[in-house]
Amino acid sequence: MAVTNRGRMTHDHDGELVVFLIGMTINAWWRPDRWLPVFLAMPRMIRELSRDRDSGLLGYRLVFDLRGPWLVQYWNSLDKLYAYASDPRATHRPAWAAYNRRARTAKGAVGVWHETFPVTHAESVYVNTPLQGLARATGIRPVTARLDTARQRITETSG
């Protein structure tokens, strides 16, 4: 069981921050031959990124939803995210090529999506919770009198 951090905490991060959402939509549950390879590709990519401290991936959270799984990822650089996506030696490129080949033969059986958010300001508070979200990806620190309100925390991240 995860340790609960008592009191009010906020994330601890300076520098560039990118939130990247990526997921798949299973449109034809009866076609696991089309969606299962897509589903299985993501854990390989996450392992590869997590093993490489210089990849830029700070952390992630897997979310399950009725249409399919998706991930919230935290990155320390937009350039590193794009570099990984286009690196021919990394797991992503062959997985993306395989998805495109399969998609041509079973149109619409599975979809993929992503959204990228470069973050200029971030505010967080965690009250009596285990590490999660941005704090889990970056670090955690107590909320002090100087960071007591959401407005104070968001102002601090704006420089």
Image (spheres, helix red, strand yellow):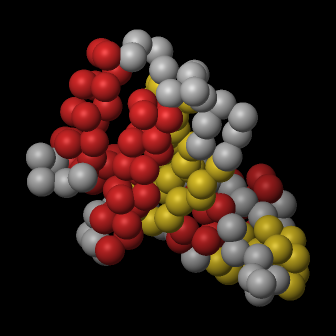
Using residue 111 as the reference point, say whether residue 128 is left or right of it: right
> Relative to residue 40, is residue 30 depicted above or below?
above
Residue 154 quadrant:
bottom right
Count of marks placed on residues: 0
In this view of the protein, can residue 26 be seen by the observer? yes
Q: Residue at x 49, y 56 (%)?
A: 74
- In the rendered image, which quarter contains the N terminus? bottom right
Left or right: 149, with 84 as reference point: right
Decide if residue 12 is in sight here.
no
Of residue 30 and residue 153, the one placed in the foreground of this image is: 30
User: Residue 4: where, in percent of width, then height?
Assistant: 81, 83
Viewer-proximal residue, 107 or 155?
107
71 w.r.t. 145: above or below: above
| Up/down of 34 relative to 19, above or below | above
Image coordinates of residue 87 in percent, x first then y, are: 16, 48
Residue 110, percent across and down? 48, 25
Q: At 28% across and 72% down in the image, what residue appears?
A: 52
Identify the residue at image location x=63%, y=69%: 135
Residue drawn at 50 percent across, 53 percent down = 73
Q: Quadrant of residue 85?
A: top left
Q: Nearer the viewer, residue 103 or 18?
A: 103
